[in-house]
Image (spheres, rainbow, N blue to C red):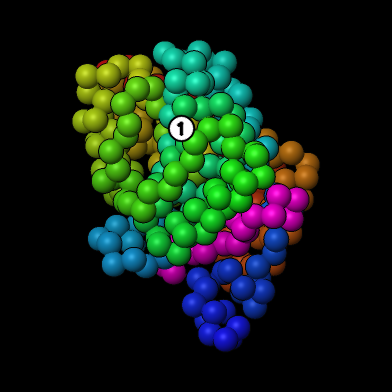
Amino acid sequence: MERKQTRKRLPGLTLADGLTQHPFDAVNGVQTSGLVAGRHLKTGHRHDRHATAYYGVAPSVLRGLVRRWMRTKGCAPLEETAFVDLGAGMGRAMLLAAEMPFRAVIGVELHPALAGIARRNAALWRKAGRALAPMRVVESDATEFRFPQGSCVAFLFNPFSETVMRRFMAGLKFQFAGRPGQVDLLYVNNEQERVVELQRGWSRLFLGPVRRSAADAIADYRILANQPDGEYASSNSEDCSIWRWVG
C-alpha cells in the first residue's frame, strides 16, 4: 500500500527525487516543501505547458514584500482586503498571509493534487489557531478566476510564463475596469515584469530585490542543491515588484 501511494506523488515530492523539508514545515507541521518542475504539472488544461514549477516562497520574502506593500497605503485597510494567491501550490503563501487580518485569503491552484494538499494545510492552520483570516482554496486556472468584490491584492510567485501572464493581466484589467485602486499586484521572482510594464492602467510602486533571512537562504540553498537534475539555483534575494491598478 505504501509503495502505491508513493507512485502517485508528483515527481519532486519524494526522498528519491531529492525532497528536503523546509524548516517552515518542520516547525509548523504542514506540507509545503518540494520542487515540482512545470513539465510534471499536467492537468489536461490548455495552459499546462506554461506552468513554471511548484516551489514554496521563502517566508521572509513574502513577509518583507507585504510590509513594503502596506507602506504604500492602498485604498482599504487590511481587514477590508482579500489576499489572492494565483498558482497557490501547496499553500505556503496562503498560510503566511492568513497570519495577518486580511478580509479573506484565497488560493487559486489548477493542479488537483497540489490544491488538495493546500486544503489540508489550511485545515491544520485553522486547527492550530494560526489563521486570523478565513481561508479557501479554489481549483481553477488563474485566467478563469473571478476576483471578489472590494479591495484585493493579487500575489504571484512566478507561476506561469508569458502567454498566461498576458492573458491573466488582460482578465484582471477587464474585471477591475471600473474599480480603480481596488487591486494591487505583488510579484515575486518577476520574470514576466515586462508583460506588466506594457499594460496600461498600472502604476509600479516598487521594483527591486527583497532579501531572504539568513535561515531561509540556508534552507533554500540546501533544498535546491539536493535536486537531482540541478535545474534551479538559489540566491539571497528575490527580484520583486508591486503594482497598483489606477485605471
Q: Position of residue 14 (x, y in %)?
A: 62, 73
State which quarter of the image contains the N terminus: bottom right
Q: Position of residue 21 (x, y in %)?
A: 70, 61
Inspect this view and state whether residue 94 appears.
yes
Label 1: few (<14), some (14–19) or many (≥20) C-alpha neighbours in 10 Å: many
State which quarter of the image contains the C terminus: top left
- Quadrant for residue 42, please give it: bottom left
Q: Does 189 sit left or right of 2 as displayed? A: left
Residue 31 counted in the magenta span: yes
Question: Image point 52% across, 73% down: which residue?
Answer: 9
Q: Position of residue 186 (x, y in %)?
A: 48, 32
Question: Image point 49% across, 44% down: which residue?
Answer: 157
Query: Eyeballing the image, is 172 above or below 24?
Result: above
Question: Image point 38% across, 48% down: which residue?
Answer: 138
Q: Which residues are magenta?
A: 26-40
The one nearer the camera, 171 or 112, is 112
The one nearer the camera, 145 or 98, is 98
Query: Eyeballing the image, is 3 above or below 148?
Result: below
- Quadrant for residue 170, please give it: top left
The one nearer the camera, 27 or 141, is 27
Inspect this view and state whether residue 90 appears.
no
Q: How many marks?
A: 1
Disc 1, SS: strand
Q: Position of residue 129 (x, y in %)?
A: 65, 39
Residue 23 counted in the magenta span: no
Question: Image point 64% across, 30% down: which residue?
Answer: 64
Query: Eyeballing the image, is 227 above or below 193?
Result: below
Q: What amino acid is found at the position of numbered circle 1 in the picture?
A: Ala
Q: Residue furthest front?
A: 127
Q: Which residue is identified by label 1?
A: 104
